Image (spheres, rainbow, N blue to C red):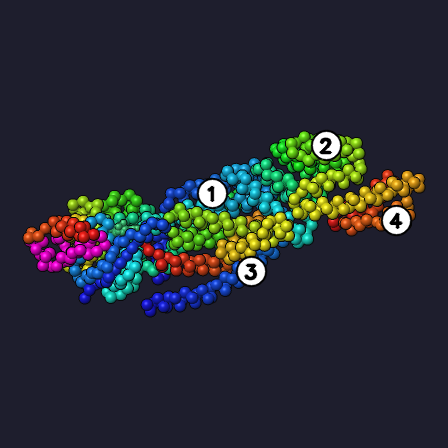
């Protein structure tokens, strides 16, 4: 079983790495990083913060592009173009297919993020070397942790992509649904906490009801904002271990449940 | 069939373990987030030159989102009973600036500005700069001109400037009639508390924002109290030739039935010109 | 012993959300003996590919049972090699990587995979493009690559959906030789094709499918007659299809 999952993951990973959009995304990320070095001098005080901000945002955005433009295709195209007929004619169970694809996606996103991290660290090091006085609060540990959680966010997104691809045969539909989940997940927190304030109760009609329904949404859609440690990294604020642990566990459990659900749905699917 | 049964068993076993664990982590995460947000630092606002580009054609949406964020930010400070510090207000002003740059026709941010930046923050100049931006962009919205006039009059004691803004407001089609009388009155009796009272009544009649309405009502109550005392003081001075030693004298000598309540919880004071103030400066402390 | 056994299979497709159902197979029963070559022919849309997808658990029948080696289909996949109708392979992989994937997925050791791969690619005439990415393959080359993918793990049952389509005459001959050599090794082969001369030459059993029903099955004696030229498969085919058209 592990052998089959690994085999499929490897194929998926290679397919992803050889997609030519990858170069475009890399160029984009490198462009932002280069820009960072150039504009660093424009800022007067918060130079270290801006550098970390830009680096993390570049990594995070590049990751999103990777998942949405290449990652989606890695699974959805299989089904769209019926390559899956070929794969499932080998002794894969449907669950193994799901986990294999997911593992491959994660490997792909992880490898690309790792490469970007190298570039990004180099940028930070360069800017820090150029303006050593403005990095008082900076800590590599926190920076790397923040990058890891950006990555975790992408892993979560991969699970969502796999889930929606297991539902539909159209890569476009899974793209739309995954994108929607991401947008909901990233804004959810703002809305939920806004509705909890007393102001909202006076201003928004049916705030109570909205709050109830959003409560349900918080169980279904992951809170992507929780993985954002950009602020801490930018200001070098210490991260609490328990805080990180809960976030990590949350992501793992969400992924596991989602993939189990995807496997169940996928087992019932037919490929005509 | 046999394998299917095993699979079902495994499936439910996995669910039985994973679902409660997920529930545990989910609720923990959300409560952690709630906690973290209490110490939410005033955020960093991307200047509008950049955010216009970042918005990728969704400027309106971005402005809505930023507005929501600032509402939440203020709301959480309010709910936690935390004072808005200087940096928070900087963030507030910068946010509103970006929001109105992204979408200058979005009226809500101006209303919020009038409601908070003047009364709470005392940043009248920032408020008027933002309001002027809005008023110029939305020339046919008399309300923004009216706010400008009010701020000039009430906070900056610039009666002439205030009257001018009010004149512009009164010329906007569909503006209420009392604006004309108010503006001419302002030009003559600018310093009178009673003018402020009229102003506030106008403002109150026009507001539908619950929070602002509550504040205005309190303020109105305070001003009504002040006007009542001022009138009694003037009457006392006219008849006795001098001002009373204390406000209680007004009551004991029958010029006032009783001292009105000071809704902000301060003590009433008055000066030689028979103007009435409060130790609370008419703000919640 | 029968390798494949379909009993009373019915299958309908729901074409769209609100469209009416399409009947693809009705009460189809057939059985294929181990070690034989079974040919399925029929007009376009007869249900040949549908039948094959049922054998691979890609689709499931509405009614009836499918058994391979007396097991339900999802348990017997390891024994099957399958070539789909229009094999769409991974674009960015090389042939070698694709075959390594096939080998690993079926639990072969790396050294075995390498050996089998070299042998198979030589057989189908792709040994010179092993390291090229599949995107650059022509239709016929892809068909051949698909064959390698299907046969790599030495399956005891080979299911081919129109294996000759898109192949040049040399390729067709290669496939025919391949099928015969597989048969010699004792494998069971189940395939469909529109090239009746090949069917006639290769098959031990031939079934004609029309509108989801089996309308004729040729016995071994009849096939001998076909090969001797006493009967013509093409006229028989057209005849049986037209006769059943009238019925329908
Ligand atoms: N995915 C599908 N959705 C709906 N209907 C389908 C689908 N696939 C096949 N059909 C229908 O099922 C019937 C049988 O199709 P099938 O593909 O099995 O034919 P075939 O015998 O393989 O034809 P061909 O010789 O053209 O390959 C046809 O009427 C077809 O329209
Ligand atoms: Mg077909």
According to the image, label 2 marks what residue? B180
Which label number is shown at residue A73?
none
Q: Which mark is residue B251?
A: 4
Q: To which chain does the residue with label 1 belong?
A: A
Looking at the image, residue A23 sits to the left or right of residue B121; the answer is left
**In the image, residue A44 lies at what x, y percent?**
61, 39
Look at the image and say whether residue B41 sits in the magenta stretch.
Answer: no
Q: Are marks 1 and 3 on the same chain?
A: no
- Which residue does the numbered mark 3 point to in the structure image? B28
Q: Of helix, strand and loop, which one carries label 2? A: helix
Q: Residue at x 80, y 37 (%)?
A: B192
* Label 3 packing within 10 angstroms: few (<14), some (14-19), many (20+): some
Of circles 1 and 3, the one toward us is 3
Circle 3 chain: B
C-alpha gap between disc 2 and disc 1: 59 Å
Residue drawn at 88 percent across, 49 percent down: B251
Any atom of ligand 1 within 8 Å of the CB at mark 2? no
Q: CA distance from mark 4 to mark 2?
A: 37 Å
Q: Does the magenta run of residues contain C206?
A: yes
Cα separation, mark 4 vs mark 3, equals: 60 Å
Left of B265 or right of it: where is C151? left
* Element assignment for label 4: helix
Q: Secondary structure at mark 3?
A: helix
Residue at image point 18% right, 52% down: C247
Which region shows up in magenta?
A: C200-228
- Mark 1: give few (<14), some (14-19) or many (20+) Cα within 10 Å: many
């Amino acid at each position: 079983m592990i052998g089959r999952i690994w085999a499929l993951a490897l194929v998926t990973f290679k397919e992803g790495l050889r997609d030519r959009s990858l170069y475009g995304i890399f160029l984009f990320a490198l462009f932002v990083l280069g820009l960072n070095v150039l504009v660093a001098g424009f800022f007067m005080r918060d130079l270290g913060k801006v550098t970390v901000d830009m680096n993390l945002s570049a990594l995070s955005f590049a990751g999103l592009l990777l998942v949405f433009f290449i990652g989606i295709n890695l699974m959805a195209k299989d089904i769209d173009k019926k390559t899956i007929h070929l794969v499932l004619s080998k002794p894969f169970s449907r669950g193994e297919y799901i986990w294999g694809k997911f593992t491959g996606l994660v490997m792909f996103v992880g490898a690309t993020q790792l490469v970007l991290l190298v570039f990004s660290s180099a940028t930070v090091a360069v800017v820090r070397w150029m303006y050593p006085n403005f990095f008082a609060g900076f800590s590599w540990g926190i920076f790397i942790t923040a990058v890891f959680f950006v990555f975790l966010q992408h892993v979560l997104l991969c699970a969502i992509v796999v889930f929606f691809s297991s539902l539909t045969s159209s890569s476009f539909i899974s793209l739309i649904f995954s994108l929607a989940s991401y947008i909901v997940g990233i804004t959810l927190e703002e809305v939920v906490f806004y509705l909890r304030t007393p102001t909202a109760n006076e201003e928004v009609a049916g705030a109570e009801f909205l709050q109830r329904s959003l409560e349900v949404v918080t169980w279904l859609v992951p809170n992507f904002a929780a993985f954002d440690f950009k602020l801490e990294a930018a200001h070098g604020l210490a991260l609490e271990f328990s805080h990180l642990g809960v976030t990590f566990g949350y992501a793992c459990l969400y992924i596991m449940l989602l993939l189990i659900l995807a496997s169940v749905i996928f087992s019932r699917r037919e490929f005509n | 069939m046999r394998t299917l049964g095993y699979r079902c068993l495994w499936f439910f076993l996995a669910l039985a373990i994973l679902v409660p664990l997920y529930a545990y982590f989910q609720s923990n995460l959300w409560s952690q987030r709630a906690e973290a947000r209490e110490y939410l630092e005033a955020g960093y606002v991307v200047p509008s030159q950049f955010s216009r580009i970042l918005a990728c054609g969704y400027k309106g949406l971005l402005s809505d989102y930023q507005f929501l964020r600032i509402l939440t930010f203020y709301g959480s400070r309010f709910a936690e009973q935390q004072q808005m510090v200087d940096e928070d207000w900087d963030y507030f002003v910068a946010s509103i600036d970006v929001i109105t740059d992204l979408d200058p026709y979005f009226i809500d941010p101006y209303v919020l500005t009038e409601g908070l930046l003047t009364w709470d923050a005392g940043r009248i100049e920032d408020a008027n700069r933002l309001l002027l931006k809005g008023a110029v962009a939305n020339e046919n919205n008399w309300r923004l001109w009216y706010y400008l006039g009010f701020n000039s009059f009430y906070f900056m004691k610039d009666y002439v400037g205030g009257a001018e803004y009010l004149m512009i407001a009164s010329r906007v089609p569909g503006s209420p009639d009392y604006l004309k009388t108010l503006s001419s009155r302002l030009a003559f009796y600018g310093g009178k508390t009673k003018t402020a009272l009229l102003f506030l009544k106008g403002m109150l009649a026009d507001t539908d924002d619950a929070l602002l309405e509550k504040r205005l009502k309190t303020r109105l109550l305070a001003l009504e109290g002040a006007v009542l005392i001022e009138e009694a003081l003037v009457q006392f001075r006219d008849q006795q030739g001098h001002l009373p030693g204390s406000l209680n004298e007004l009551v004991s000598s029958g010029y006032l039935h009783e001292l009105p309540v000071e809704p902000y919880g301060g003590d009433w004071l008055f000066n030689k010109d028979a103007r009435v103030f409060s130790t609370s400066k008419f703000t919640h402390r | 012993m029968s390798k494949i056994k379909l009993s009373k299979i019915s299958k309908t497709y729901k074409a769209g959300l609100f469209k009416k159902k399409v009947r693809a197979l009705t009460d189809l029963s057939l059985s294929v003996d181990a070690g034989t070559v079974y040919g399925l022919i029929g007009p376009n849309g007869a249900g040949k590919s549908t039948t094959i997808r049922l054998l691979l658990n890609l689709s499931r029948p509405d009614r009836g049972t499918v058994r391979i080696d007396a097991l339900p289909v999802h348990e017997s996949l390891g024994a099957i090699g399958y070539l789909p109708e229009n094999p769409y392979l991974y674009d960015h992989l090389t042939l070698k990587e694709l075959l390594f994937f096939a080998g690993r997925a079926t639990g072969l050791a790396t050294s075995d995979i390498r050996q089998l791969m070299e042998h198979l690619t030589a057989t189908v005439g792709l040994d010179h493009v092993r390291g090229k990415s599949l995107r650059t393959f022509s239709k016929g080359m892809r068909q051949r690559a698909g064959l390698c993918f299907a046969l790599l793990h030495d399956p005891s049952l080979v299911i081919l959906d129109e294996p000759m389509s898109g192949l040049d005459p040399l390729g067709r001959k290669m496939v025919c030789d391949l099928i015969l050599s597989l048969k010699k090794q004792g494998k069971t082969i189940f395939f469909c094709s529109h090239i009746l001369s090949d069917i006639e030459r290769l098959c031990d059993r031939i079934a004609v499918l029309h509108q989801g029903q089996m309308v004729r099955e040729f016995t071994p004696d009849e096939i001998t007659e076909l090969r001797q030229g006493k009967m013509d498969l093409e006229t028989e085919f057209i005849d049986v299809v037209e006769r059943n058209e009238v019925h329908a």
